[in-house]
Every structure is written in structure tokens, then in C-alpha cells.
Image (spheres, helix red, strand yellow):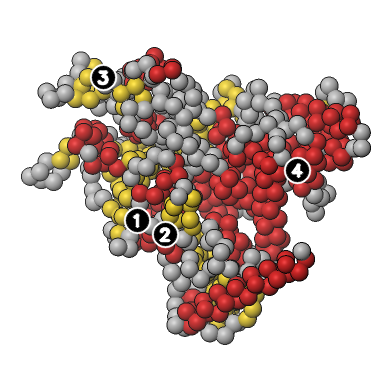
Amino acid sequence: MAKKKAAKKKKTEATADTVLAAARERLAEKGYSGGTEHEFPDGKGWLFQSNGRPELLLCAVAPDVSIDEHQGQVAVLTGLSAVDDAAVPYVHVTNGESSSTFHLTEDGDRAIPEVPNAEEASKAVGPRVGGEMAKELDTYTMMMDRFNQIHEHIYGAGEHVSSSNEAIDELCKLIYLVAVLNHYQGQGKSLPIPKTGKELADILDPARFQSKKEKDREQAVEDARVAFEHCRDLKEFNTTIDGKKLRIFEDRAYLRLEKPDTYAMALSVLMSPRDDKTNGVTLRQIGDVTGRALEVVLRRKYVGRGGMGAYLTPQQITKFVAEMVFVDLKREKRLDDLIKRDDQDRPTFRFCDPFIGSGGFLLQLMNKTTRYIESLVTLDAKRRDKIIHDVLNSCFVGADRAPGMVMKARINMAAHGGIHAPIGRVPDSLTSPELDEWIGKIDVIATNPPFKKDGITRKKLKGDKHGEDDPIGGESGAAILDAFCEGIEDGVMSIDPNKRCLGAKPDKKGVWKPVNSMDPAVLAIDRCLQLLKPGGKLLIVVPDGILCNSSYRYVREYLIGTKDESTGEFSGGKAVLKSVVSLPQETFGLSGAGAKTSVLHLEKKRSPADRQSAVFMAVANEVGFTVSKKVEIQLGETRNDLNKIIAAYESGHDSEGQQ
């Protein structure tokens, strides 16, 4: 058996060597030469240098290794730790067929369409980094392995979980328990757990679940369940805003795991000692690579559902949208708004995702915001850390009607430093009063709402379904549609920007009348505009039918007004159209939706006098992956047209993906 493993390892190394050699030949055509071997955890590496300065790190893996988000993270972290005091400006990772290229700067890493030529790379300077980056790479790869290992064990151990998604939920609960322990250990405190007579550190000791006595093992499981219920309700790990509780877990959430062996395995993995003499993972460190590892694992393991069910937005889309937002903020000289505070010294800028899922959009915006604040050299370390803490815990607003999604988002946000981010469960994001307090207060919304024709209907549904995946009908559907008629009076649409009107539509005479059903994506646009400040940005994924079908023409005119064909000017409308980026059919292929989609970019009007200007239009024919037989196949960032599109958007030119 050992010989077989050794032979397999040798074959993999040889294959990675072959890929590396072929890639070096291709890069020679761009002027790269010389260099030295460099360690790369998942394969082979080669560091190109010019006059003693690093210019490009080439990372090669075996052909059967997917060039996905994980490989990108490993390559970037390797590039950041390539030299002692400065990172490599460019990183290229390939398996011979697919590849990704990243530009590393003080603002973070950005995927780019192709490797620059050697002359350009020799002039670039990578970000300044400390000596801790090698440790971050080790931590990331270690935590990825650990999270994967625990998930697979839970899913395959015959526990009370029926899907990969439920196994993710149990993984998150265990991570949360260990994070609570870290929190108290970091303060030099212990946490007694009522009804057990034990402290949390003792309850989470893996040895208790490995006792030779069955009775002791069963008691260890019971104590762990009691500990979770106590920690679930701790005030310091839940958010209260204006007296309203925004919980990480539902008040009846419990640990489903029953087998002592599962606890022993998982806690043994999570409770490995750290350098700071605490145990396991921590949700306290801002920008911790633990958060990145958890985010990747959640996306890899989550199984999307059809209907109006949850489906995690691909990271290629969330990253692209975050890049567009920051291009806008930089172009409009509004980056300093991110750190502005009110007269009570509270941050004032607000990002929002009313249909948050696992938090993908907000996580990308959070990372870019953190990097921007860290780049401000005028701030001393203490002031910078306080600003980052305050921003991460108050400036990212989210909601969802699925408790499992809210839990994943809260754990995900906490792992990135936003443990008290104002994110909570709502009956529905379209009308819930919990979101009404944000009307007219949000600066940027980035979201991917559920979409389904007739997804909100007055008709009573067969079987009176009320699941998270199901359309909303009957009295509930009627109540939502009625709420979206608040801006209609005597058949006339209100021009009040905070009044919703798309629960109705105009008849042939222009009289607005209530509709019997509507795609929730249409209502989501209306709701998001209501939440935005005047001048606020909305970047939302919508089905293309809203943008081009004649039946939705009134929606488009409601948003941006009617066009005077003689002058080309638009009049009316509640927003200015900034851009439309068309996505390929397979972008949401795993969701079961099958709809062709686009990213719609609107700016809420500051006044009726605001005029429509030129619109940025782009088509992405590839977004770095394809879907075949219900499996997502990664193609690498060099086959992600969104990288070219963001470069074109930044330069102010229209763009189309490769034909």
C-alpha cells in the first residue's frame, strides 16, 4: 500500500514538473528567463526575478487539479510570502489547460486576463508584507484541510444530517463553540456552563469523547449540547440594534450530532494549540485566513436548490461586483466616506445585501474596505484597528428569510472580523419591517435576489407550501404585492423615490392597477431603490427578461424613465442606469434556474433633474467556469471575461468578452 502511495506521489510530482516546464517555455515568449525553484504546497513553483527583485511567481499543479478559488488563494498567499519584505507583484497558477493570473498590490489581489510581459513585470512592485505571510499560508492550507475533513466525517458518519448543507450547519456550530472558547481564553477567563458543573474548556476536551466508558462518552455528548444552547444565547456573540436582537442561531437551534467519535474527531482537529496558547480557530482576528478557508469550504460544499431556494453566488461574480463598487467610489473620490463618523463617533457608511445567502457580496466588500483602511498611512495602528473593528461590525447590513443562510452568513462575517455585523433573519426581505429602518439610509447594495416567474402570487398555492424554496402565495403573497402598491394612488404612480409601485402595472390607458403575480426579482429592484440613499448604488443580478422582454418595458421605464426619440433624452424614472454586464447562461446553471442573467447597475436619483448619461455595456462569454452534468468545472481566471470587463470599466471604455 505504501509503495502504491509513493508511486502515485511520484507520478503527481512528475506531472506537475511537466506542467511547470511547459509553462516556463510559454512565458519565455513574454521575455521571462532565469529564475529559481520555489516551494509551492500543491505542486511546483518557479520564481522569476529581475535585478534581484521578484517579478512573477509561476505555480504549477497536476492536470487533474482544478484551478479554482482554493488554488488561487494558495498561489496568492505563496506569492505574498515569496520573499522576506516584499511580495511578488504577479502570480500565475496553471494545470496546463486552465490558469489564473493575479496582480498583487497594496490594495489586495486582483485577477487579471493574462500574464504581463517581463518588461512590465520588472517595473511593478509588490505589496509590502511582514514576515508572517508564510505562517498565513500554512494556516490557510491547514484550516482548509481541517474544515474539509470535519465536513466529510460528519456527512459520512451516519449522523442526523441528510445533506451536505446540513453537515455544513453542524460544522459551523462546532466552529462557533471553539470560537467562544477562544474569546474567553483570549481574555484570560473561563466560561462555566450551567447544568453541567463544568467549564467550556473541559466540555470541549476531545479526550472526554474517547473515554473507555460508554456512559462517560454519552455524558460528554449531552454536555456539548447543553454548552451549545448556552453559548448560542450569549449576548456578546449576538447583535442588538435599537432593542432588536439579530441572532447568529435561531433560538431553538441545537447540536444534531450524537456520536462521540464525531465530536472526538472534530474537536481534535479544531482544538490544536495555537502560538497564543489558545486552542483552535478564532473568529476574533481581522482578515484571518481562517475566514478565507471557511468561506471557500462553504461554497465548495454547499448544494444549491431549484425553485426560489438558496444558491450561493459564484465568487467570480461577487468579486467582480465588489471591484465595480470600489471603482465607482474611487472615481467619485468617495473612498474617505468609508471612515466617516457621526457626532456620536459611529461609522456612517452602509453596505447592504437584503438577500444575503452566505454573505458572498458583503464578504468581498468587507475585504476591500479593510484593505483600504489598512493602506491609510496617516493612521496609527491603534486608531486603524479601532476603525476597522467599528466598520466591520456596523457597516455591513444583511437579511435573509432562510435561518440556515443567516447562520452561515453570520459565521462567515465573524470569521472575517464582523462578529456583530447587523445581519438577521426576516420573514421576507421585500416587506419586513426589520429592514424598513434602513429606508433611504444605504449607500451601496450588492445582491442576487431569488427570481422566478410568478414567484409572488395572490393565488393560493397547491398544498399551501411555505418552504424556503417555494413561491409565496395566498394571503402572504397578496400582502407583499399590496405593499408594493403603496406608491399608487387613483391609478397614478408616485414620484416619491421611497414609495414602491411595482406591485402594479399600467394598463393600455396608462392607469396603474394591482397585478396578480410578479417575479420577486422585479420587486427586489423596487425594494433596493427604496433602501438606498439618494445617489446610492445598486448592483443586482437579474434575469435578462426584465431587461429586454416587451412585457417588462413598463418596469424599465419606471426605473430610468421614457426616452424622447427626437432628443435621446430620458424623462422620469427613479434611477440612472450606470451599466449592464451580461453573464453567460451557465453562471447559475447549478441553481436549477436556467435563466440567462446580467448584473444591473443603477444609481438612485438625487433629484428628478438627474439625467441619464452614457451607459457602460459589456458581455461576458466566460466567467472562469462552466457546468457539465450538474458539475461546476473550473476554467481558471484567464478564462474569466469579467477581469477584462472590470479593466475596461475602470478605464471608461465599453467591453465585450471574447467571441
- Gap between marks 4 and 3 measured at Cα: 54 Å
Front in this rendered view, residue 287 or 533: 287
Image quarter of the N terminus: bottom right
Question: Is disc 1 in contact with disc 4, using a CB cutoff of under 8 Å?
Answer: no
Residue found 66% across the figure and 22% down from its top: 252
User: Which residue position is annotated with label 2?
Assistant: 640
Cβ atoms under marks 4 and 3 closer than 8 Å: no
Image spot of residue 635 (x, y percent): 46, 60
Q: How crowded is mark 2: few (under 14 residues within 10 Å), some or many (20 or more)?
A: many
Q: In which quarter of the image is the C terminus?
A: bottom left
Q: Which amino acid does label 1 sit on?
A: Ala
Earlier in the chain: of badge 1 and badge 2, it is: 1
In whole angstroms, how far apart are the C-alphas of marks 1 and 2? Answer: 8 Å
Q: Which of marks 3 and 1 is nearer the N terminus?
A: 3
Label 4: how many Cα within 10 Å (few below 14, some 14–19, many 20+): many
Foreground: disc 4 or disc 3: 4
* Location of mark 1 (residue): 620
Residue occupying the far left of the picture: 566
Q: What element carries label 1?
A: loop
Q: In this view, does 3 lie above or below 497?
A: below
